[in-house]
Amino acid sequence: MSTDLGSRRSQALSASYRLFYDEPFEPIRGEGVWLFDKNGVPHLDAYNNVASVGHCHPAVVRAIAEQSARLNTHTRYLHPAIIDYAEDLLSEFPESLNNLTMTCTGSEANDLAIRIAQCYTGGTGLLVTGWAYHGVTALLADISPSLATGLRLADHVGLIEAPNSYRSSNFVDSVKAAIVKMQRQGVKPAALIVDSIFSSDGVFVPSKGDLAAAARLVHEAGGIYIADEVQAGFGRTGVHRWGFQHDTVIPDLVTLGKGMGNGYPVAGVVGPRTLHEEFGHQQRYFNTYGGNPVSCRAAHAVLDVLRLENLQSSALQVGIYLKRRLQALAERFEIIGDVRGAGLFLGVELVQDRRTKRPATQAAALVVNQMRHRQVLISATGPAANVLKIRPPLVFDFANADLLVERLELTLQTLS
Ligand code: PMP
């Protein structure tokens, strides 16, 4: 057997998996914003939003270890860890969103949210953005066009435009058109589901009022608005706890995941009791691992750290600073067409030509790979994979931002 981890991996693991970077990265330890390789070389992590309060945060590690050593069961027994967390989490939401169902992954949360929506509305139609990603189940693969180019859309799926602030886009009009098309085909809309930071579509913050208008249209058609906060939730966008709060409309359901447990698998659906009841009275939902006492203690520790270390406000301040420094780079490097995003979720769109805005896909891949060799981890997103995705743990500070910009500057110099 080969001792090379890469070839052993391709022998043992399925073909669906993809590795990051031309030269795969092999971290063996994490701490805060740093990932260390086997030689002890620190790499600045500007990519992993799952470790939202920092890799291996001691408070989260302790919570997991202590509860694991005492008891781990499930939601069918009474346990204070589950109820304490549910109550505390719900206190972070507008009053009407007062019920929680827990799952293990963002996919399970979205899958359940759609089942609740379809049960509540009696419709089946789902409206999603053109390059959305919502998860891994069969139901979600149908509404995740970003999984592969040219996937055939299911009949009950309507595509809408992302609110692209860089290129012209008609987000609200596209929702209207997709609803009309759906209705003409005899499909009743069940839900509009959008990632509040449109991460796979290329990172966008919609203009205020756009989501409210889109939600109104969906409501008029008998459907509901689901905010997928798997990416944008838990303070990442800086100004608000939840990405949907950039607009005035309160979603009918909110799905959570990723940063919720800092790496421990815990996710969930938050919504009004009425909506959960409609579904819950018709059928039971039991997720063996979802919301177990260990995951609840982990998630509760994350929430505590988020508050104690003021990480949302830090994401706002550091995010503004980083964005400004990236915008300053854009004044010197023609290849940067746009810098956008909110808090510590930023997108830097690379273009071949600022006038035509032709995507610089190859250059983006080059930048991502060169940054990895300069010990800074980022990625690329968007339909043309030309938007640098910068989405570090929320403990990312000003000095980390300086380091990222310095290394990006060096990298961009090699391109010109
Ligand atoms: N929704 C969004 C917006 C996501 O980005 C992801 C994961 N990338 C998911 C849902 C699915 O979450 P998970 O991988 O935990 O199933």
Image (cartoon, rainbow, N blue to C red):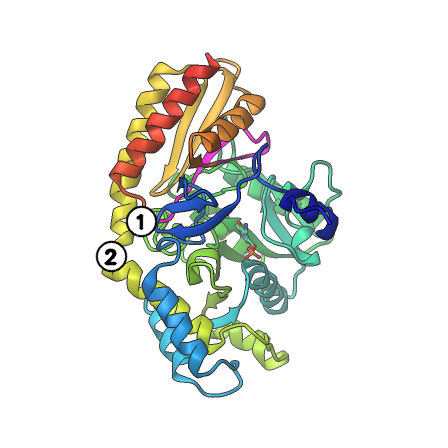
Q: Residue at x 59, y 63 (%)?
A: 108
Q: Is residue 40 above or below residue 119?
A: above
- Which of the two discs, 1 and 2, labels the residue nearer the N terminus? 2
Which span is picked out in magenta?
379-394
60 relative position to 284: left or right = left
Residue identified by numbered label 2 = 309
Q: Position of residue 413 (x, y in %)?
A: 41, 16
Q: Nearer the viewer, residue 98 or 23?
A: 23
* Residue 287 visible, this angle: yes
Q: Residue at x 68, y 51 (%)?
A: 141
Question: Magenta stretch: residue 385 in it?
Answer: yes
Q: Is residue 321 above or below residue 336?
A: below
Name the amino acid type tagged 1.
Answer: Val
Marker disc for residue 395? 1
Q: Nearer the viewer, residue 14 or 209?
A: 14
Question: Magenta stretch: residue 142 in it?
Answer: no
Q: Is residue 176 above or below residue 225?
A: above
Q: Residue at x 38, y 48 (%)?
A: 393
Looking at the rendered structure, the secondary structure element under dot 1 is: loop
Q: Are marks 1 and 2 in contact (CB under 8 Å)?
A: yes
